[in-house]
Amino acid sequence: MAMTRRGWPAVVAVATLLVTGCTAGSRPATNDDAVLETLSVTESASATGSGDADPDRRLRFAIVTHGSTGDPFWDVVKTGAEDAGQANNAEIDYQSDPEPGSQAQLIASVTSRQVDGLIVSMADPDALRETIAAAVAAGIPVITINAGEDRSAEFGALTHIGQSEASAGEGAGDRLRDAGVTKLLCVIHEAGNVGQEQRCQGAARGLGVDGSAEPGDIMRTLRVNGSNLAETETTIATELQADPQIDGVLTLNAAVAVTAATAIGTSGSGAALATFELSDDVVQDIGEGDILFAVDQQQYLQGYLPVVFLALFARSGNVVGGGEGVPTGPRYITQENLDSVHIGTR
């Protein structure tokens, strides 16, 4: 489907998200020492972002994610960031590496170049703690996106932009329960990604109705190598054949969803399928009834909004979010609202 929202004026995105940001849940408080340290860092950063001596100068923002090069999901994040950079006179340096140690090295490298702002996804927060702390200590404002919401304030970030993975998973579990699913296979495709673990845990809560059932009775977690889809298909099919009581499958990205749909067919299972994330293939499968729904976190906004927020901070000292995260999802895409989907701006 064609992209329809490139080049949105920055003010439109800000006005929209200022409202939804007020509904986000507060991030959990840390111990008193950590809170005081975070407040000190944030106040220091706010002082440096209280207005630019040259408001017309071109800004430089770095984005370092845990995505893989050419990943359709992260390509949309990059597109959003570049569109916002064009609208806000900002140069965007986008880099990614799925290996936590390599991602940390990328963060250290851009910190040494003294960029005007840093945007980071934190699938493995502990691996990035030292390098993010070094960026904050160097006076570089940081915004986290996509993963790591629970640790964002602790690390001194201005705000977090994304969705609550736990609540999104719980919503998915609720919908699968309503569809008649009694035992779920939740497929984790990325080792060490805390957000994927939270999605599956949330799904178990949503599926569990009153919480009295043992987790193993209502959900099994399957860990696969998401970079090898042929192997993933075989693994899912084998699991479905081994446990015919599994009547639902939840995948956590679009490519694995399409693979799971094939595995369900080859295994002879009648399991219902739902997924996180969208792609053209997932949209087609939803339309044809092969996938019940997709959990859309609108990753275009996860690229677009942090650039807008950092530009506002650099030029006027404005901080969006009020100490809470700014949600971009979840939105549940079904056959009923499929016509509203525009791949490339999600």
Image: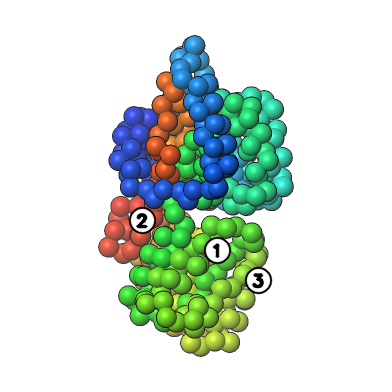
Q: Answer few, some or many: residues within 10 Å of disc 2's Cα (few below 14, many 20 plus, some between 14 and 19).
A: some
Tell me the residue at 42%/31% (across/down). Answer: 319
Q: Are marks 2 and 1 in contact (CB under 8 Å)?
A: no
Which quarter of the picture shows residue 140?
Answer: top right
Which quarter of the picture shows residue 139?
Answer: top right
Distance from Cα at disc 2 to Cα at disc 1? 19 Å
Q: Is residue 38 above or below residue 184?
A: above
Residue 181 visible to an observer of this rendering: yes
Instruction: Please state which amino acid type lies under the numbered disc 3.
Output: Glu
Q: Position of residue 212 (x, y in %)?
A: 42, 81
* Of callouts 2 and 3, the N-terminal one: 3
Q: How is the model colour-coded?
A: rainbow
Q: Answer few, some or many: residues within 10 Å of disc 1's Cα (few below 14, many 20 plus, some between 14 and 19).
A: many
Tell me the residue at 48%/29% (across/down). Answer: 310
325 sits left or right of 60 in the view: left
* Of callouts 2 and 1, the N-terminal one: 1
Front one among 221 and 257: 221
Instruction: Indicate which label's residue lies in the foreground, 2 or 1.
Output: 1
Q: Residue furthest front?
A: 32
Instruction: Please state which amino acid type lies under the numbered disc 1.
Output: Glu
Where residue 197 is drawn, which disc sits there? 1
Where residue 231 is drawn, which disc sits there? 3
Tell me the residue at 59%/52% (across/down). Answer: 123
